[in-house]
Amino acid sequence: SGSAALARASRISTAAALANKQMEAYRGLRYDNIVFATSEWNSALADSTYTADTVYTQNMESPVTPKGLVPTVTLCPTNVPTAACDPSYTTTGADNRSYRVDTYLYFDTPTSGGQLKTITVVVRNTSDLTRTFARMSSTFDPSTSA
Protein backbone atom coordinates (compact mmCIF):
# COMPACT_ATOMS: atom_id res chain seq x y z
CA SER A 1 0.00 0.00 0.00
CA GLY A 2 2.95 2.31 0.61
CA SER A 3 4.13 1.82 -2.96
CA ALA A 4 0.65 2.61 -4.30
CA ALA A 5 0.49 5.76 -2.16
CA LEU A 6 3.86 6.94 -3.46
CA ALA A 7 2.82 6.28 -7.06
CA ARG A 8 -0.39 8.28 -6.60
CA ALA A 9 1.49 11.12 -4.91
CA SER A 10 3.88 11.18 -7.86
CA ARG A 11 1.00 11.38 -10.35
CA ILE A 12 -0.66 14.18 -8.38
CA SER A 13 2.61 16.11 -8.16
CA THR A 14 3.23 15.78 -11.90
CA ALA A 15 -0.36 16.79 -12.68
CA ALA A 16 -0.05 19.86 -10.46
CA ALA A 17 3.11 20.86 -12.31
CA LEU A 18 1.29 20.46 -15.65
CA ALA A 19 -1.66 22.54 -14.41
CA ASN A 20 0.72 25.24 -13.22
CA LYS A 21 2.58 25.19 -16.56
CA GLN A 22 -0.70 25.69 -18.43
CA MET A 23 -1.75 28.53 -16.13
CA GLU A 24 1.68 30.17 -16.49
CA ALA A 25 1.18 30.18 -20.27
CA TYR A 26 -1.91 32.35 -19.71
CA ARG A 27 -0.17 34.58 -17.19
CA GLY A 28 2.36 35.49 -19.87
CA LEU A 29 -0.31 36.60 -22.37
CA ARG A 30 -2.08 39.85 -23.04
CA TYR A 31 -5.73 39.77 -21.94
CA ASP A 32 -6.96 39.92 -25.55
CA ASN A 33 -4.84 36.88 -26.48
CA ILE A 34 -6.47 34.62 -23.89
CA VAL A 35 -8.73 32.77 -26.33
CA PHE A 36 -9.50 29.34 -27.76
CA ALA A 37 -9.17 28.41 -31.41
CA THR A 38 -12.59 27.61 -32.91
CA SER A 39 -11.69 24.16 -34.27
CA GLU A 40 -10.24 22.99 -30.93
CA TRP A 41 -13.21 24.48 -29.07
CA ASN A 42 -15.63 22.54 -31.28
CA SER A 43 -13.69 19.33 -30.60
CA ALA A 44 -13.84 19.94 -26.85
CA LEU A 45 -17.61 20.52 -27.03
CA ALA A 46 -18.00 17.14 -28.72
CA ASP A 47 -16.22 15.42 -25.80
CA SER A 48 -18.54 14.26 -23.02
CA THR A 49 -15.76 14.31 -20.40
CA TYR A 50 -15.01 17.96 -21.13
CA THR A 51 -18.66 19.02 -21.06
CA ALA A 52 -19.46 16.99 -17.93
CA ASP A 53 -17.05 18.92 -15.70
CA THR A 54 -18.76 21.13 -13.13
CA VAL A 55 -16.91 24.23 -14.35
CA TYR A 56 -18.44 23.73 -17.79
CA THR A 57 -21.94 22.81 -16.61
CA GLN A 58 -22.17 25.62 -14.04
CA ASN A 59 -20.47 28.46 -15.94
CA MET A 60 -20.25 27.73 -19.66
CA GLU A 61 -23.01 25.42 -20.83
CA SER A 62 -25.77 28.02 -20.50
CA PRO A 63 -24.05 31.08 -19.05
CA VAL A 64 -26.27 33.46 -17.13
CA THR A 65 -25.27 37.14 -16.95
CA PRO A 66 -22.80 38.29 -15.67
CA LYS A 67 -21.08 35.15 -17.02
CA GLY A 68 -20.46 34.61 -20.71
CA LEU A 69 -18.38 32.68 -23.19
CA VAL A 70 -15.15 34.18 -24.48
CA PRO A 71 -15.37 34.35 -28.30
CA THR A 72 -13.15 31.91 -30.19
CA VAL A 73 -10.71 32.83 -32.95
CA THR A 74 -10.09 31.09 -36.27
CA LEU A 75 -6.34 30.81 -35.72
CA CYS A 76 -4.29 30.94 -32.56
CA PRO A 77 -2.38 34.27 -32.48
CA THR A 78 1.22 33.82 -33.67
CA ASN A 79 2.75 34.88 -30.34
CA VAL A 80 0.56 32.52 -28.28
CA PRO A 81 1.60 28.94 -27.39
CA THR A 82 -0.60 26.42 -29.20
CA ALA A 83 -1.58 24.73 -25.93
CA ALA A 84 -3.02 28.04 -24.69
CA CYS A 85 -5.55 28.05 -27.56
CA ASP A 86 -6.55 24.40 -27.10
CA PRO A 87 -9.15 23.66 -24.41
CA SER A 88 -8.34 19.93 -24.27
CA TYR A 89 -5.19 18.03 -25.15
CA THR A 90 -3.07 15.09 -24.02
CA THR A 91 0.55 15.51 -22.98
CA THR A 92 3.34 13.51 -21.38
CA GLY A 93 4.49 14.54 -17.93
CA ALA A 94 8.00 14.53 -16.49
CA ASP A 95 7.25 11.02 -15.19
CA ASN A 96 6.71 9.85 -18.82
CA ARG A 97 3.02 9.18 -18.15
CA SER A 98 0.15 10.52 -20.20
CA TYR A 99 -2.14 13.25 -18.84
CA ARG A 100 -5.14 15.07 -20.26
CA VAL A 101 -5.18 18.83 -19.71
CA ASP A 102 -8.63 20.47 -19.93
CA THR A 103 -8.91 24.25 -19.75
CA TYR A 104 -12.16 26.13 -19.14
CA LEU A 105 -12.39 29.81 -20.03
CA TYR A 106 -15.32 32.19 -19.52
CA PHE A 107 -16.16 35.79 -18.67
CA ASP A 108 -17.39 36.71 -15.21
CA THR A 109 -18.14 40.07 -13.63
CA PRO A 110 -17.91 40.28 -9.85
CA THR A 111 -20.27 42.69 -8.11
CA SER A 112 -17.37 44.93 -7.13
CA GLY A 113 -15.66 45.33 -10.48
CA GLY A 114 -15.28 44.96 -14.21
CA GLN A 115 -15.36 41.95 -16.47
CA LEU A 116 -12.76 39.23 -15.85
CA LYS A 117 -11.70 36.12 -17.73
CA THR A 118 -11.82 33.09 -15.45
CA ILE A 119 -9.63 30.11 -16.29
CA THR A 120 -9.76 26.70 -14.67
CA VAL A 121 -7.24 24.00 -15.61
CA VAL A 122 -8.09 20.37 -14.85
CA VAL A 123 -5.54 17.57 -15.29
CA ARG A 124 -6.97 14.07 -15.63
CA ASN A 125 -5.74 10.50 -15.82
CA THR A 126 -5.89 9.51 -19.52
CA SER A 127 -6.59 5.88 -18.67
CA ASP A 128 -9.51 6.83 -16.39
CA LEU A 129 -10.92 10.25 -17.29
CA THR A 130 -13.15 10.25 -14.21
CA ARG A 131 -10.01 10.68 -12.07
CA THR A 132 -8.87 14.25 -11.64
CA PHE A 133 -5.32 14.70 -10.39
CA ALA A 134 -5.15 18.51 -10.28
CA ARG A 135 -7.48 21.53 -10.57
CA MET A 136 -6.37 25.16 -10.57
CA SER A 137 -8.30 28.42 -11.20
CA SER A 138 -7.32 32.02 -11.75
CA THR A 139 -8.89 35.25 -12.97
CA PHE A 140 -7.45 37.75 -15.44
CA ASP A 141 -8.54 41.36 -15.86
CA PRO A 142 -8.14 43.72 -18.84
CA SER A 143 -5.16 45.42 -17.19
CA THR A 144 -3.26 42.22 -18.08
CA SER A 145 -1.78 43.65 -21.24
CA ALA A 146 1.97 43.20 -21.17
Image: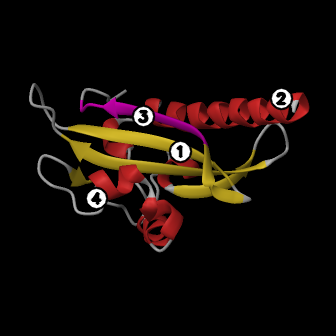
Question: Which contiguous range is marked in magenta?
Answer: 133-142
Quadrant for the N terminus, please: top right
Query: Is residue 106 part of the magenta span, yes or no?
Result: no
Closer to the camera in the image, 119 or 134: 134
| Mark 4 or 1, closer to the camera | 1
Amino acid at pointer 2: Leu
Amino acid at pointer 1: Val
- Mark 1, Cα crowd under 10 Å, few <14 / some 14-19 / many 20+, is many
Q: Is residue 64 above or below residue 16?
A: below
Task: Residue at 37% x, 27% y: name it.
Answer: 146
Which of the 4 image quarters holds residue 30? top left
Kindly identify which residue carries mark 1.
122
Kindly identify which residue carries mark 3.
137
| Mark 3 or 4, closer to the camera | 3
Q: Regarding mark 1 in the picture, which secondary structure is present there? A: strand
| Mark 3 or 2, closer to the camera | 2
- The answer to whether residue 36 of the structure is visible from this angle is yes
Amino acid at pointer 4: Pro
Left or right side of 32 for 86:
right
Kindly identify which residue carries mark 2.
6
Kindly identify which residue carries mark 4.
71
Give residue 105's position: percent from left, percent from top. Answer: 37, 48
Left or right side of 97 for 67:
left
Give how far apart the Cα atoms at labels 4 and 1 are.
Answer: 21 Å
Give residue 107's position: percent from left, percent from top. Answer: 24, 46
